[in-house]
Every structure is written in C-alpha cells, then in structure tokens.
C-alpha cells in the first residue's frame, strides 16, 4: 500500500497509529507527494493528505475512510467496534476531527493581516476547540487507552494542539482529560508518531 505522508499532519498521524496498532505499518510506503503535486490530484481530486493507494490500485481518502480500511485488514482487535460502542467511537472521532478541522485553518488565518472578519473567524474556530475540550473533559473517565478510533482521533487532536498551539494551554481547564492524555502519550504508537515540523 502507498500512503501520502506528512510528519506534521494530525490526520496522517491518526492513520499511522491505526496501522501501528493493527500491525500493518510495515506494509505502507510513502507516496512522496505534497498537496500541490498534480500526481496527488490525479489520485485524490481534493489533493489532500492523507491519501492511501491500496494494493489493488484504489485511492482512498479522507482519514476516516483510510482508518476504517486499515482497520479492516489488520489482525489486532478492531478499532471500529460493533453495536452501540461503534456510535460512541464514531462520535469521538467526529469530535477529534472537529478539533483538528478548526485548528488547522486557524493557524493559517493567524498569519494573515487581521481584519474584523478574520478575527471573528479565528474566535469562532477557537470556540469550537474550547467547547470540544470541555465535552471531552466531561467524558474523560470513559476513555480507554487507544482501543477505538475515537480515542485515537482525540489523542491526535490533543497532540496537534500541543504541537501548533503551545501558547494556548488546554490542560488547566481539563485536568481529567490531561491525565488520560498523559497515559496515552506513553504508548508506543503515540511515541512513534510524534509530529515533526
């Protein structure tokens, strides 16, 4: 399988953690393409990373689809559970993806000249992250140690906040979530996928 890679992308990190936990990370080779590469656009019309090309040549995108595909071919316990647990895992995945979705464009907007519209957009995105952190804090006691796609996504989202927004600490307002995150940070899949600029 071929995989578009970026050491700074939390979405790539999420997929890599799934591959590591499922024991198939050795089957992934880097496509060595950036988002502006026409070859990536030919595979993925959105020209986004991550993109996964399966062994039979099918291009898969975005990270939720890639993660579910990787989960379907590994041998370890499934990260997308069945029954009621599936909906909880998918809800957490959506919350973690939402944190990342609100954080990535905000980073670009901060670097641009500020006007009222841009300041309002930045504040709106930051508010989404703060509400998501508050929700996760209220549910921190139910989180396992990367046993579902939801927990993996939340861990990647928190890692991205630490990586790109160290000046906006979240732990003080979410001590239970911070304690959970400290535990998962020690897990091999998290250590092996630490973001790099």
Image (cartoon, rainbow, N blue to C red):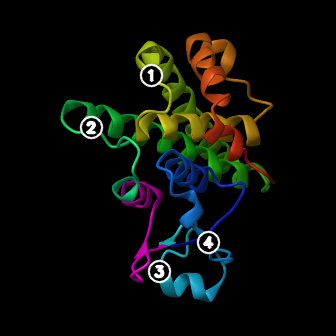
Q: Residue furthest left?
A: 83
Q: Between 62 and 71, which is closer to the camera in this rendering?
A: 71
Quick check: marks 4 and 3 in contact, CB under 8 Å? no
Question: What stretch of residues is rendered in magenta?
Answer: 53-70
Badge 3 vs badge 2, beta-carbon distance below 8 Å: no
Judge whether residue 117 can be spotted in this image: no
- Which numbered mark, 3 or 1, is in the foreground of this view? 1
Q: Residues within 10 Å of mark 2 (few under 14, many from 20)?
A: some
Task: Determine which residue is flagged by label 1.
Answer: 143
Circle number at residue 29: 4
Regarding mark 1 in the picture, which secondary structure is present there? loop
Residue 81 drawn at (x, y percent) = 29, 39
For the residues labelled 2 and 1, the Cα–Cα distance comes to: 14 Å
Decide which of tag 3 and tag 2 comes sooner along the chain. 3
Q: Where residue 39 appears, x then y in whole percent?
A: 59, 88
Residue in view at x 43 percent, y 75 percent:
54
Side (left or right) of 142 relative to 167? left
Mark 4 or mark 3: which is in front? 4
Q: Residues within 10 Å of mark 3 (few under 14, many from 20)?
A: few
- Picture residue at 75% right of the left edge, 48% below the top: 110
Q: Earlier in the sequence, mark 3 or mark 1?
A: 3
Mark 3–mark 2 Cα distance, whole angstroms, equals 29 Å
**Which quarter of the picture shows residue 174?**
top right
Q: Which mark is residue 45?
A: 3
Of badges 4 and 1, the one in the foreground is: 4
Which residue shows up at 42% across the image and 37% down it?
150
Circles 4 and 1, Cβ within 8 Å, touching? The answer is no
Image point 47% across, 80% down: which residue?
Answer: 45
- Looking at marks 4 and 1 on the same chain, the residue that comes earlier in the sequence is marked by 4
- Any magenta on residue 133? no
Mark closer to the observer (3, 2) = 2
Which residue is identified by label 2? 86
């Amino acid at each position: 399988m071929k995989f578009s890679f970026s050491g700074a992308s939390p979405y790539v990190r999420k997929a890599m953690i799934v591959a590591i936990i499922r024991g198939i990370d050795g089957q992934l080779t880097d496509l060595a393409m950036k988002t502006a590469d026409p070859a990536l656009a030919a595979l993925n019309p959105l020209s986004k990373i991550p993109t996964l090309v399966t062994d039979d040549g099918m291009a898969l995108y975005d990270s939720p689809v890639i993660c579910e595909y990787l989960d379907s071919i590994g041998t370890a316990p499934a990260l997308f559970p069945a029954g009621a647990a599936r909906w909880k895992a998918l809800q957490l995945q959506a919350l973690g993806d939402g944190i990342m979705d609100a954080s990535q464009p905000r980073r670009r907007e901060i670097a641009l000249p500020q006007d009222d519209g841009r300041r309002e957009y930045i504040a709106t995105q930051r508010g989404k992250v703060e509400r998501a952190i508050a929700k996760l804090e209220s549910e921190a006691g139910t989180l396992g140690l990367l046993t579902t796609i939801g927990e993996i996504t939340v861990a990647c989202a928190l890692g991205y906040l630490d990586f790109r927004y160290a000046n906006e600490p979240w732990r003080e307002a979410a001590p239970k979530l911070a304690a959970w995150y400290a535990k998962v940070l020690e897990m091999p899949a998290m250590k092996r996928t630490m973001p790099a600029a």
